[in-house]
Amino acid sequence: MLPTSINAIEAYSGANGILKCGSRSVGEPHIYGRRSRRRICCCPRVAGVHGLQCGVLWSCWDRAAKICNNLLLAISMIGTAEAMNLGIRLGLDPKLLAKILNMSSGRCWSSDTYNPVPGVMDGVPSANNYQGGFGTTLMAKDLGLAQDSATSTKSPILLGSQAHQIYRMMCAKGYSKKDFSSVFQFLREEETF
């Protein structure tokens, strides 16, 4: 897999690409746009390490669901980071705030399983200076895929577009190798918003 759609398009059809006129390849045609679907056949792939252990394969349709899932995940992570940041600045203890959120209607995976605030949970990237996990660059890539898909289907993704901008800005400001939950650290350090 390549990190961005641009890299993949260049690898397939660029000046030194692997495709010659009339040839076909296997891959993920949804990434490259509608025109490419004639030249790229859908290739199932393993759904991560856990998927490999469970024997799960994803088809290209499942990849569309993954794009939608990561769109929602990015939005909920940013929302969790913003809520936690605001609560901390209002004087609330982060662990207590997380406990309250996780017993309330604001509870989500980003708050109860993968909290972005250092010291709230053990065994998550925020407890390890945002090392490991799902990289910010990969989240920005997936949000770009969501943006491209939304444009091609004329589907508004207002929050998704904002999330894409935030993760792209994070990559430009040195967060590209950190876990995507480092959006909390990014918000804490950005006093100019």
Image: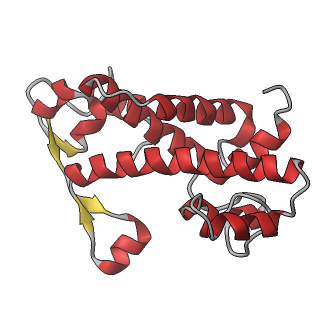
Left or right: residue 155 versus residue 2 is: left
State the residue lying farthest toward the top. Answer: 15
Does residue 114 appear anywhere in the picture? no
Q: How is the image coloured?
A: secondary structure
The vertical placement of 91 against 11, above or below, is: below
As drawn, 130 above or below 137? below
Q: Residue furthest front?
A: 104
- Of residue 77 and residue 95, the one placed in the foreground of this image is 95
Residue at image position (48%, 35%) is: 160
12 over 59 or under it: above or below:
above
Q: Which x, y percent locates residue 170?
A: 68, 36
Front one among 132 and 180: 180
- Residue 55 position in % (x across, y down): 27, 76
Outermost residue toward the right? 91
Q: Which quadrant does the C terminus fall into?
A: top right
Q: Is residue 103 left or right of residue 151?
A: right
- Asked if one can make out residue 177 in the rendered structure from this viewpoint, the answer is yes
